[in-house]
Image (tube, rainbow, N blue to C red):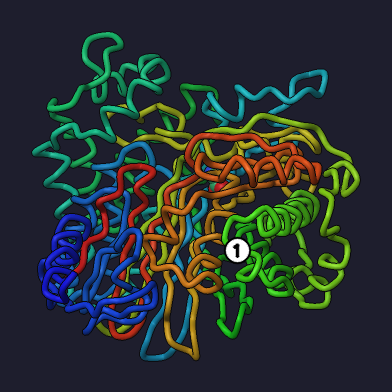
Amino acid sequence: MSTRRTFAALAAALALLAPALAQSPQPSPERGRRSAQVEGAPPIISVNARILPAMAKNGMVVSQEAKASRIGVEILRRGGNAVDAAIATGFALAVTLPRAGNIGGGGFMLVHLAATKQTIAIDYRETAPADTPHDVFLDAAGNFVPSRSQSSGLAVGVPGTVAGFELAHRKYGSGKLTLAELIAPAVALAREGIEVDDDLADSLPFIARRLAQYPSSRAIFLKGEARPLERGDRLVQEDLARSLERIARGGSKGFYEGETAEKLVAAVRAHGGRMTAEDLRTYEVKERQPVRGYFRGREIISMPPPSAGGALIAQMLNVLEGFQLKELGHNSAAAIHRMAETMKFGYADRAEHMGDPDFVRMPIAALTSRKYADVLRGMISMERATPSAQIRALDLAPFESDQTTHFSVVDAQGNAVSNTYTLNFSYGLGLVADGTGIMLNNELDDFAAKPGAPNAYGLTGSEANAPGPRKRPLSSMSPTMVFNNGQLEIVTGSPGGSRIITIVLQVILNIVEFGMNAAEATVAPRIHHQWAPDQLRIENGISTDTVALLRKMGHEVREQPTIGSAQTIHRTGGWLFGASDTRQRGGGAVGY
Ligand code: GLY
């Protein structure tokens, strides 16, 4: 094939797969093998890459929903920095991705400031109300009652999103745009309404029964008694528009005090919860020291407790650095075995040690030390899977679904935001606080209701993660950044409950260890082991031969539906490469 024809074929593929490229200089490829380079593009994009990321030079937003990403990019074009864009995207997702985007939930934001090379971890996780007894989710006989932590007002944590975004804007925004200007696009979308797209249309039927219990939720998301909105219908959220406007006018006081606060408290208490106006008024965002780890010369910066993610990712990368995964082959049985065994140790530590850092001391330095990793690596048999029960006694429990949402932002100056936030379940509790349009979370199910009792993600925990007044439940959300020679290289994160940590781990491994581009790293089939239950979860796409080899080594291999939805930006060679996970349709990678 001539160079000209190769170029034409590549250009066609790029046009199809990466709309953002339309605004970028057209690359001109050389012919050749896997390592052949596209002129003007960095080495990572080769002519025979299996799938291409979106590409941009100046700035990029990658989220699970394209309208929200475009709003973020518009903020960048108007001179806002990555933090401004992230906040506008976050408020927009509360309207366009109501199953996980939120102002009634909470999350974590990692901010990197290029000028000072500072990386800050903002913890805006929900807290338990002050009146939260230790046994809040147990019956009189001391048995865990999942409906209390998942389906009642007791499940609702004091939301942190609005306070988190306000702090990020005040301390780390560009100062060129007001909070009201960042909220305005979300207000418009809520008031004018959005056409129900595939994601909304497909997610609503799963949750329709839960929503139908509450007239306030039914009125927004259902037609008649229980029929979900369908493709082409309009989702109009007038109450949400007014709640957003109160924040635009009054900042976080427009949420934590006054009309919105009164209505949130009334809704929670009407459904058996204990939240008070005082709980809302005294909600505090925390800035924390991020967790740092190292892998193949890179520095990994991620979320500290109350997320378990950063520490486990650092720990697992330390262990895996001692194996030659690349030589073993991506998703070979030998590589998967080493990864799964490493994951088991990480999740056993999660269950044993981790909780809210304001209440428990955690051995983070030890967990993330190379010496500890050497010990763990030495305990891994290369031939056989070690049963989880031999690592620690446990109960087996079912898994649950992919909720939560992540977005990544990088601006022209190299500032970046990695943000994961959540309502916990899809559409949280399913209860919209009457008159606010605000969907409430059921985050307090992330506590260990009692030692050994699995939560909805099958995660068990110890006293370290027990419920208690004003405590933050332990999370797996892992907004993460990777730095190479001090330069920002990767911004990533994902929804996926307990699986978030291993998803982020695999995105990093796929780019750094296996040399994949962001899109390849995202679509590659994933695996997951969380120690309890003792099952190696795999996505469709791992070969039958590989599965047979893993079973021979003693792994109980279970195929499961898609694992997570990573939203990644890879910054290399002067380019930004974005990949919005196609597992949940993708399309939210937008650059300029
Ligand atoms: N609600 C899921 C998490 O925070 O890990």
Residue at position x 55%, y 67% in the image:
509
Q: Amino acid at mark 1?
A: Gly
The x, y position of residue 173, in whole percent, is: 30, 74
Nearest the viewer among 66 and 108 is 66
Q: Is residue 427 above or below residue 60?
A: above
Nearest the viewer among 279 and 422 is 422
The x, y position of residue 385, in whole percent, is: 81, 48
Residue identifier under label 1: 329
Q: Secondary structure under badge 1?
A: loop
Left or right: 380 as drawn, with respect to 248: right
Nearest the viewer among 549 and 338 is 549
Residue at position x 56%, y 34% in the image:
560
Q: Quadrant of residue 360?
A: bottom right
Residue at position x 49%, y 62% in the image:
479
Quarter holding the N terminus is bottom left
The x, y position of residue 526, in whole percent, is: 54, 49
Quarter holding the C terminus is bottom left
How many numbered tags mark residues here? Answer: 1
Nearest the viewer among 579 and 137 is 579
Residue at the extreme top: 225
